[in-house]
Image: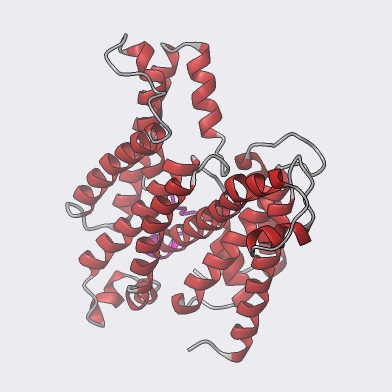
């Protein structure tokens, strides 16, 4: 049960999340006062009709996407660090992101390599998410099969890294035979983006996201037992193999759908679990799962707000901001606290 102190923590973080949400929505090349934003969202009177289109069709979906992506990646990172008992494990160690990237690379870069056998990558708005999802699913299937063949959990980690290296090698070959415009399109996708989703895409994204979140809440006891190793988990009656597969499946679903809709976004999944453990000083997943979800949304909203270069019409790649501003913060926290709960 969450103690009073943790309740205060969650209340502060929740309020901060709401504030940052509206700050993020207010930023952009067109300055829109917070008062008008609230009027648009809640059916009040506002100054310009064009502001409604900007808020409801662009900024509001982007802010929602930032929360979904940030919290999803953070939960993935927490699950992987717990399963592998490795503080350097992140949401993409299984090679899921690389598989998704390979699917997109085949769609974008493959047209030159296969000389017209593949169809053009500009079919519809769903082309990239579908290609990315298929690539992630293929790697997921391979990882699950491998996980049932080996007993050592570290072997699964190595297998995931090898799948990632294999996918990267294939992408390099495709890029070598591709046109400059195709390479540029793929590189732009790899920067990550939060602002390209329609409401229909967000609905699909959110549905899969909530399935993954609900799944993670059902395995809190196995996650806590894995902190002390698989032998301990077995001793208290945990079905290690089944729960290991569930953790891999949940992580793959979340990481796959996030990569499919927003591209590969670095740092967040690796760092937010550590920041949460330092703030809450606990390793209990009953507390950590909601903590990393809220904090992940906060971190990515901050990074996206910075990326928009307030008062400027330019937007920096979200990947650059998450690493540039996030890594020094984690280094400072680790040096200051000198301990992480694994």
Task: Residue 28: say if magenta.
Answer: no
- Nearer-the-camera pick, 17 or 198: 198
Left or right, 285 with respect to 315, comes to left
Task: Residue 90: say if magenta.
Answer: yes
On screen, 255 above or below 176? below
Left or right, 66 with respect to 172, comes to right
Residue 293 in sight here: yes
Please name the residue shown 67% across and 50% down the image: 303
- Nearer-the-camera pick, 117 or 141: 117
Q: Position of residue 260 (x, y in %)?
A: 42, 41
- Nearer-the-camera pick, 8 or 58: 58
- Say which quarter of the image contains residue 44: bottom right
Q: Where is residue 241 in the image (x, y as percent from the top left)?
A: 21, 64
Predominant SS of the magenta segment = loop
The residue range painted magenta reads 81-93
Please name the residue shown 73% across and 53% down the image: 26
On screen, 155 above or below 333? above
- Say which quarter of the image contains residue 166: top left
Q: How many numbered circles does the render carry?
A: 0
Q: Residue extending furthest right?
A: 311
Please name the residue shown 23% across and 51% down the image: 144
Residue 93 in sight here: no
Q: Residue extending furthest top?
A: 115
Q: Where is residue 42 in the image (x, y as percent from the top left)?
A: 64, 65
Left or right, 184 with respect to 243, comes to right
């Amino acid at each position: 049960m969450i103690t009073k102190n943790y309740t205060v923590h969650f209340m502060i973080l929740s309020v901060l999340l709401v504030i940052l949400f509206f700050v993020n929505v207010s930023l952009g090349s067109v300055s829109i006062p917070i008062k008008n934003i609230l009027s648009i969202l809640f059916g009040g009177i506002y100054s310009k009709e064009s502001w409604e289109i900007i808020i409801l069709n662009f900024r509001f979906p982007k802010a929602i996407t930032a929360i979904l992506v940030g919290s999803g990646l953070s939960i993935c990172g927490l699950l992987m660090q717990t399963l592998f008992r490795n503080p350097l494990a992140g949401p993409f160690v299984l090679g899921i992101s690389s598989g998704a990237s390979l699917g997109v690379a085949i769609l974008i870069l493959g047209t030159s390599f296969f000389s017209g056998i593949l169809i053009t990558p500009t079919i519809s708005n769903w082309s990239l998410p579908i290609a990315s999802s298929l690539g992630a699913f293929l790697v997921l299937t391979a990882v699950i099969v491998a996980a049932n063949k080996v007993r050592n959990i570290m072997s699964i980690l190595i297998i995931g890294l090898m799948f990632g290296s294999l996918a990267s090698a294939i992408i390099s070959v495709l890029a070598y035979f591709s046109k400059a415009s195709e390479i540029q399109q793929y590189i732009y996708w790899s920067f990550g983006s939060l602002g390209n989703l329609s409401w229909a895409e967000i609905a699909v994204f959110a549905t899969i996201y909530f399935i993954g979140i609900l799944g993670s809440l059902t395995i809190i006891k196995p996650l806590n037992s894995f902190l002390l190793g698989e032998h301990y988990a077995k001793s208290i009656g945990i079905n290690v193999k089944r729960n290991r597969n569930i953790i891999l499946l949940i992580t793959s679903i979340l990481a796959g759908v996030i990569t499919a809709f927003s591209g590969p976004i670095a740092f967040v999944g690796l760092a937010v679990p550590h920041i949460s453990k330092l703030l809450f000083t606990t390793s209990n997943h009953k507390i950590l799962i909601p903590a990393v979800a809220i904090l992940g949304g906060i971190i990515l909203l901050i990074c996206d707000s910075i990326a928009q270069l307030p008062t400027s019409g330019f937007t920096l790649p979200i990947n650059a901001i998450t690493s540039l501003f996030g890594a020094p913060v984690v280094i400072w926290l680790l040096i200051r606290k000198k301990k992480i709960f694994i």
